[in-house]
Image (spheres, rainbow, N blue to C red):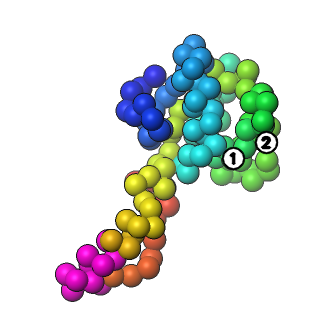
Amino acid sequence: MTEQSSTQPAQGMSIERNDAERFEQALHWAVDYRGDVTLCTEDSEIECFVFDLTAEGDTLRYMTKQDLTRIPLAVPQIREIRFSGKDTAAGKSFERWIQRYIEKKLAGENASIECDSLEDE
């Protein structure tokens, strides 16, 4: 595992199945992560957005940029989870947005409601 944060995922973090406790945690993180995840199986690497994990924890569902179909994948097939894309929600809360807006207004800068680009940097 690439160690960046022990309490939540960060872009670049990678967790392998042989670390069972962290792998289980990574499955849940992948569902909450607001960026792309790469799921590595024995025969492929799937860059996708994970949005669902069954209550039993045996299947997750994902979508790719090329195919918006909801695709199921059996968890035992996954050997590694990589948090490969930028987490678009990292460090962004409504409270922080309001604080930055007020700071810009008080500094005489142009404060607007436009959001950041979702494109990878």
Q: Main secondary structure of the magenta part?
A: helix
Residue at 64 percent of width and 43 percent of height? 31
**Does the image show residue 65?**
yes
In the picture, measured across the screen, residue 6 lies left or right of residue 49, that is: left
Residue 89 position in % (x across, y down): 48, 56
Which dot marks residue 51? 1
Residue at 55 percent of width and 51 percent of height? 34
Local crowd size for mark 2, using a 10 Å CA cut-off: few (<14), some (14–19), many (≥20)? few
Quick check: is 13 in the magenta stretch?
Answer: no
Answer with mark 2 or mark 1, whichever residue precedes in sequence: 1
- For the residue marked with disc 1, what is the amino acid? Phe
Q: Is residue 109 above or below residue 76?
A: below
- For the residue marked with disc 2, what is the amino acid? Ile
Span colored in magenta = 100-110
- Residue topped by disc 2: 71
Residue 55 position in % (x across, y down): 78, 36
Q: Is residue 21 above or below residue 33?
A: above
116 and 9: which is toward the camera:
9
13 and 93: which is toward the camera:
93
